[in-house]
Image: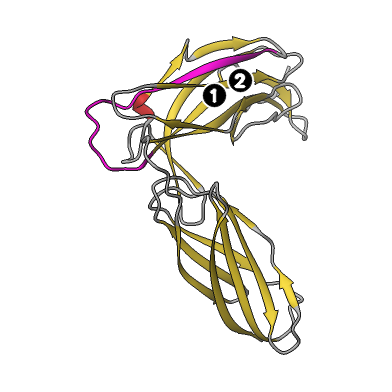
Amino acid sequence: MKRLPYFLLLLALIFTLPVAAQTGLSVTPPRVYFTVAPGQQQRQKITVSNVSKTSTLDLSISLNDWSYDDKGNNQIFDAGSTSVSCAKWVAILPSSFFSLAPGEQRDIEIQLAPPASLKDTIPVHTAMLYVSQLNPIDDVSQKGTNIKVAVRTGIKIYQRLPVARNANLDIDNFSKSKEELILQFTNIGNVWADGTASCELLNKQTGKKTTLKDIIFYSLPGNKRKVFFALPVSLEKGEYVASAVLNYGDEATVKLAELEFTHE
C-alpha cells in the first residue's frame, strides 16, 4: 500500500488567533507592558486558550528578541542578542511547558526583573514571547495531501523605567517618489509611540480635496520610520499640496508636514 507523504506545517503568527479546522491557539493580550526599575520585579498575566474542540495541545513557551525595520516590519533575533533585549530578565511561572484540553484556557504569569547592576541608558527594552505547539495534529491540505499542523503565536514584551513618559516624534522629511508620498520620522522620546499617519491632498487649481488611506504605525525610542501613502490611480493631473499628520500618544499629540508637488 502506497503511503502518502506527511509534511510538518509550522504557522508562525504574531498576535494570535485560530489557524486550522482541527487546531487553534489564542494568546491574549498581544502586548505586555512593564514599568520596573533595575533590582525590582513585576508580574503580568497572559491567557493561553486552546480554541480547538477536539485536540489537546502540548505547549512550550520560549523567548526571542525583536525590532522594527524602517517600514515597521518585525525582525526576529536570538534571545539576548540585541542591545535592547530584556529576554534574559523574563521568567515564566509556574512552568514553560503545559497542556491544554480542548476548549481549556490557562493564565500564565510573566515575571520581569532587570538586574540591579543594569547601568545602560536604553529607555525601552523588548522581547518576543512565543507559545508553540509541540504535538502536531494530523490534517489534510486543500489538495488532499496528509499534513501535520503545529501552531505558534507570539506576544511582544516591553519594559521601561519608572520615569516620566515623553512620547515624541520628529518629522524628518516629506517627499514624493513616483506614485507615492513618503513621510519619514524619528521617535525621539523615551517610550513607545503608536498612532496613525494620515494625509490629505488639495488640488490647487480646482480646490478638490482627496483623503488618502490612514496608516497605523508603532515605534520605539530611536526608531527611524517611513510610511508610504499611495496616490490614487484616478488622481487628476495638477498642482497639489499634501498635508500629512502624525497622531500619536496617550494625549493625542499631532505633528504636521506639508509638501507641494506636481502630478502629471
Is residue 107 within the magenta segment?
A: yes
Residue at 53%, 67% in the rendered image: 183
Classed neighbour count for the residue bearing mark 2: other residues with Cα under 10 Å, few (<14), some (14–19), many (≥20): many
Determine which residue is flagged by label 1: 131
The CA distance from mark 1 to mark 2 is 8 Å
In the rendered image, residue 109, in percent from the top left (x then y), is placed at 50, 17
Determine which residue is flagged by label 2: 48
In the rendered image, residue 13, in percent from the top left (x then y), is placed at 60, 35
Give the extent of the magenta segment. 104-124
Residue at 33%, 33% in the rendered image: 80
Classed neighbour count for the residue bearing mark 1: other residues with Cα under 10 Å, few (<14), some (14–19), many (≥20): many
In the rendered image, residue 48, in percent from the top left (x then y), is placed at 61, 20
Q: Do the numbered discs 1 and 2 sit on residues whose CB atoms are within 8 Å?
A: yes
Position of 55 relative to 237 (above/below)? above
Element assignment for label 1 = strand
Front residue of this view, candidates 111 and 234: 111
Q: Amino acid at mark 2?
A: Val
Is residue 247 within the magenta segment?
A: no
In the rendered image, residue 168, in percent from the top left (x then y), is placed at 45, 55
Mark 1 vs mark 2, foreground winner is 2
Find residue 2 and report its image quarter. top right
Position of 258 relative to 145 (above/below)? below
The total number of labels drawn is: 2
Find residue 81 and report its image quarter. top left
Element assignment for label 2 = strand
